[in-house]
């Protein structure tokens, strides 16, 4: 079937210092289709979006719009062409009303304008899609779903021809998602092109006309509806890499290290981040936690380390109940934490490596004399840790922010492991690291297991999970939906569990 | 073609030291035009500033007298800055400290000099601290912006002191001037060399040393630095950030409060209208310029003292308005901040290229 194309990218490549974000991406989008971009985190979806919306300029390759090569040097350029995007993080002025927010998106509003004229224009769109939004409500009062409508309307009043949705359902309830899909289908029928980004398999099956799978910065394949099913997409997305096996003793499942009973955590919006979550962790076990990002993994790590409070349920470490402990006391109870976002919560960027290494135990006798810090001891500790963990720390007194990501991660690991924790909660510990550093992190976890440390390894990298874990549990919408043995499971099985299929 | 600013990692030591010096000269140069416009020869005026403030025992002592409250207030402000807490209320805290010390001096009836001074000091410390502590508690518990609270509380403090000196505390023998009775000798700090220089100055230096040790050597200083560098990391490390916010604002206000004590016990020997001509606000500038270091605070406070005394003499001998001294301060700050930018960024001119 010969289709006309609205937007075409040819062999797009984009690199950042040390990272190839996009390697070779070719993709074409026809008018009046819903085209889904599917890929794991880190596959290059966001980078591609930023290229299409003019935020990044590709190093190589070309973009054709309406068959004409185009160069975007700013988001304004691509908007002017008619490419609009609904971001994951909304770009609204919270104190402005719905109408005022929409008005901001309209070009050429005269200084003295007829409010009624524009209001009618916006109202027409609202009516057309049966959206019940009050134009005079300030944006901050609206639900997340309604705020997303505003973003959409902003693109529609601009007459955008290509609408990009970056994981729009991540923040929506199932009902809101269903409604969004209805609107998207309708827009498609009107001839608009929609580029839909998601890694939720079910949605992709439901709505897409064509699916392009992105893996490690390359566009693998584009399949029209009917030529794909969930299994096929899952195996394409996750890939068929060989798993290098690691020698580690099997967990004996004798001594319980940590037990989570019916734990629930609600977030600021009152939604459940963790929903009746129950799990057991044994001494020396590496428990892999798989799941699409945003399904409660972060809440699990934070509640275990005392950064978040549980709404209900209990956490037991041995015979102690540590449910209501703060970060400090749970550290003492032996839980260490490698946080998701090392730069924003793992370190004090302006301070030295030595100072960062004692952040968790600065108050311990080892590093202080009465109220004074023992600078000599802190220094000795730094020298020892830098040597032991092979940290490239730069000149003495160098603020830690000048270190590379891998070395910052090593500092955090060195610090977290320094008090011989009984449990390590590692949240995406190798994300963004080069292979060498990632291997190092793996080695640390395995060595820890050999010495009896239990690890909760939360990761999106199935290779990593399959390689290290004694057992893999899968999270979906804050619930534990499955538990598999890495020796016998398949990627497809895990992929399906991740998309919310219930285990048979 | 366009100008592009690029971040640079570390600039040379020479440049980091010379940039502020150069910027002060640029400020002097620009201020020269203001002086010219006022019909004054700039070179003569600058010479006079330095002669008046540094050229004689009297001038130097006056400079140190002005430097004293600036050191206290700036130490207080810079302590809070280290934790990214913005205490804009040093002015009010000075007034409250002065007010507390005065209450003790007038009504306690203590006769021993040592006891009296100690009691005045502690009261000023406590009152100044509690005054700022209000903002600290509000910030820690309800996340109320401390900038607004500390700033607005200045007006309460200043007008509250005015009420006392126009009303209940007014000296009955004071010919109806808005001031309290003179303190007894027990409530006065020692003066030196037959000048107005008093022991408050040395207390200020001592205070700077203590604060330096506190920040750089103690466990609490470490905590403050971690919280200031990254509050999320501090929480993750199990630090009690709320308590720390209150404690730091309390200490910050307490140290500013000592400035009030030092002014009434060392200089004025009574509480009167306008005991601080804006030291608390100048302290914000000083704390910023000093990069929040205690030694820096002492140096910059001294420079500001030079400017204040020199500026006064310009008023007397050339009939220049007070505003000139402020304009001068402003210019120096402006150019110093600009030099910061050039220390951290490299500016380049690049040819515009549309196509990569």
Image (cartoon, coloured by chain):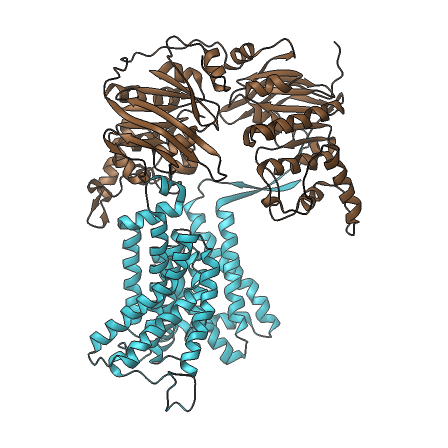
Chain colours: A brown, B cyan
**Is B94 located above or below residue A127 in the figure?**
below
Q: Position of residue A11 (x, y in %)?
A: 63, 17
Residue B216 locus on image (x, y percent): 30, 50
Of residues A408 and A116, the one nearer the viewer is A116
Quadrant assignment, res A381? top left
B144 with respect to A371 (left or right): right
Q: Position of residue A426 (x, y in %)?
A: 36, 27
Tag count in the figure? 0
Judged left or right of residue A44, residue B248 is: left
Q: Residue at x 50, y 39 (%)?
A: A269
Quadrant for residue A345, please give it: top left
The relative height of residue A349 versus residue A244 in the rendered view (above or below) is below
In this view, the residue in front, B198 or A453, is A453
Residue at 77%, 45% in the rendered image: A109
* Residue B61 percent location from the top left of the image: 35, 74
Q: Is residue A302 left or right of residue B184?
A: right
The residue lying toward the viewer, choosing from A467 and A352, is A467
Q: Inspect this view and state whether residue B49 appears.
A: yes
Q: Nearer the viewer, residue B196 or A214?
A: A214
Looking at the picture, does residue A406 appear above or below residue A210? Answer: below
The quarter of the rendered structure image containing the C terminus of chain A is: top left
Name the image quarter holding the N terminus of chain A: top right
Answer with left or right where residue B73 lies relative to residue B112: right
Res. A339 in view:
no
């Amino acid at each position: 079937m010969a289709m006309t194309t609205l937007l075409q990218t040819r062999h797009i490549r984009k690199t950042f210092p040390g990272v190839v974000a996009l390697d070779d991406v070719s993709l074409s989008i026809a008018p009046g289709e819903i085209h889904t971009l599917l890929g794991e985190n880190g596959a290059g979806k966001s980078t591609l979006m930023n290229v299409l919306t003019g935020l990044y300029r590709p190093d190589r390759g070309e973009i054709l719009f309406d068959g004409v090569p185009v160069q975007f040097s700013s988001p304004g350029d691509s908007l002017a062409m008619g490419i609009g995007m609904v971001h994951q993080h909304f770009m609204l002025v919270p104190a402005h009303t719905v109408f005022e927010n929409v008005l901001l998106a309209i070009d050429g509003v005269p200084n003295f304008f007829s409010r009624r004229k524009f209001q009618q224009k916006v109202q027409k769109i609202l009516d057309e899609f049966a959206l019940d939004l009050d134009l005079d409500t300030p944006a901050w009062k609206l639900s997340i779903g309604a705020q997303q409508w505003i973003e959409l309307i902003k693109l529609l009043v601009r007459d955008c021809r290509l609408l990009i949705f970056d994981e729009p359902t991540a923040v929506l309830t199932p009902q809101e998602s269903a409604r969004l899909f209805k609107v998207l289908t309708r827009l498609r029928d009107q001839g608009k092109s929609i580029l839909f980004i998601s890694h939720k398999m079910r949605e992709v099956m439901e709505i897409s006309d064509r699916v392009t799978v992105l893996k490690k910065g390359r566009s693998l394949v584009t399949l029209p509806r009917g030529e794909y099913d969930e299994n096929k997409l899952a195996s394409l997305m996750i890939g068929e890499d060989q798993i290098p096996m690691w020698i580690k003793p099997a967990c004996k499942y004798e001594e319980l290290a940590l037990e989570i009973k019916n734990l629930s955590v609600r977030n600021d919006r009152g939604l459940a981040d963790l929903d009746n979550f129950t799990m057991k962790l044994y001494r020396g076990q590496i428990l892999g936690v798989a799941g699409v990002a945003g399904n409660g993994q972060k809440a699990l790590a934070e509640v275990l380390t005392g950064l978040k409070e549980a709404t209900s349920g209990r956490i037991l470490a041995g015979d102690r109940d540590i449910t209501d402990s703060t970060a400090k006391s749970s550290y003492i109870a032996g839980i260490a934490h490698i946080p998701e976002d090392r730069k924003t919560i793992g370190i004090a960027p302006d301070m030295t490596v030595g100072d960062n290494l004692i952040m968790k135990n600065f108050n311990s006798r080892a590093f202080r004399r009465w109220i004074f810090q023992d600078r000599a001891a802190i220094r000795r500790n730094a020298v020892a840790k830098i040597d032991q963990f092979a940290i490239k720390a730069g000149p003495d007194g160098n603020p830690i922010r000048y270190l590379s990501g891998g070395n910052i991660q090593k500092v955090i690991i060195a610090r977290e492991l320094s008090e011989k924790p009984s449990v390590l909660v590692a949240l995406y510990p190798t994300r963004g690291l080069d292979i060498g550093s990632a291997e190092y992190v793996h080695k640390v976890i395995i060595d820890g297991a050999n010495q009896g440390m239990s690890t909760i390894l939360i990761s999106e990298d199935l290779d990593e999970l399959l390689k290290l874990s004694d057992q893999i549990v899968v999270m979906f919408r804050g619930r534990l939906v499955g538990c598999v043995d890495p020796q016998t499971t398949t990627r497809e099985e895990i992929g399906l569990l991740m998309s919310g299929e219930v285990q048979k | 073609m366009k100008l592009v600013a690029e971040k640079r990692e570390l600039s040379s030591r020479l440049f980091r030291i010379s940039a502020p010096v150069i910027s002060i000269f640029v400020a002097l140069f620009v201020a020269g035009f203001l002086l010219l416009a006022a019909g004054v020869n700039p070179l003569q005026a600058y010479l006079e500033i330095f002669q008046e403030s540094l050229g004689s025992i009297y001038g130097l002592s006056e400079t140190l007298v002005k430097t004293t409250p600036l050191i206290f207030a700036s130490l207080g402000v810079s302590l809070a800055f280290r934790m990214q807490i913005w205490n804009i209320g040093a002015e009010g805290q000075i007034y409250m400290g002065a007010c507390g010390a005065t209450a003790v001096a007038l009504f306690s009836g203590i006769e021993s000099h040592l006891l009296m001074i100690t009691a005045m000091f502690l009261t000023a410390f406590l009152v100044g601290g509690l005054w700022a502590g209000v903002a600290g508690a509000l910030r820690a518990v309800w996340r109320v912006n401390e900038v607004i609270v500390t700033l607005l509380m200045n007006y309460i403090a200043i007008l509250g002191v005015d009420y006392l000196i126009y009303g209940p505390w007014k000296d009955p023998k004071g010919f109806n001037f808005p001031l309290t009775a003179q303190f007894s000798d027990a409530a006065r700090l020692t003066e030196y060399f037959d000048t107005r220089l008093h022991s408050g100055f040395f207390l200020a230096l001592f205070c700077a040393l203590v604060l330096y040790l506190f920040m750089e050597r103690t466990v609490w200083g470490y905590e403050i630095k971690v919280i200031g560098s990254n509050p999320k990391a501090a929480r993750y490390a199990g630090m009690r950030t709320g308590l720390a916010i209150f404690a730091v604002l309390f200490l910050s206000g307490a140290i500013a409060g000592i400035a009030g004590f030092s002014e009434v016990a060392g200089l004025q020997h009574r509480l009167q209208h306008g005991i601080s001509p804006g030291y608390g606000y100048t302290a914000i500038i000083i704390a910023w310029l000093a990069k929040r270091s205690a030694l820096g605070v002492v140096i910059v406070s001294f420079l500001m003292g030079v400017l204040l005394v020199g500026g006064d003499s310009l008023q007397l001998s050339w009939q220049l308005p007070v505003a000139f001294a402020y304009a001068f301060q402003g210019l120096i700050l402006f150019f110093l901040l600009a030099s910061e930018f050039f220390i951290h960024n490299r500016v380049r001119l690049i040819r515009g290229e549309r196509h990569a």
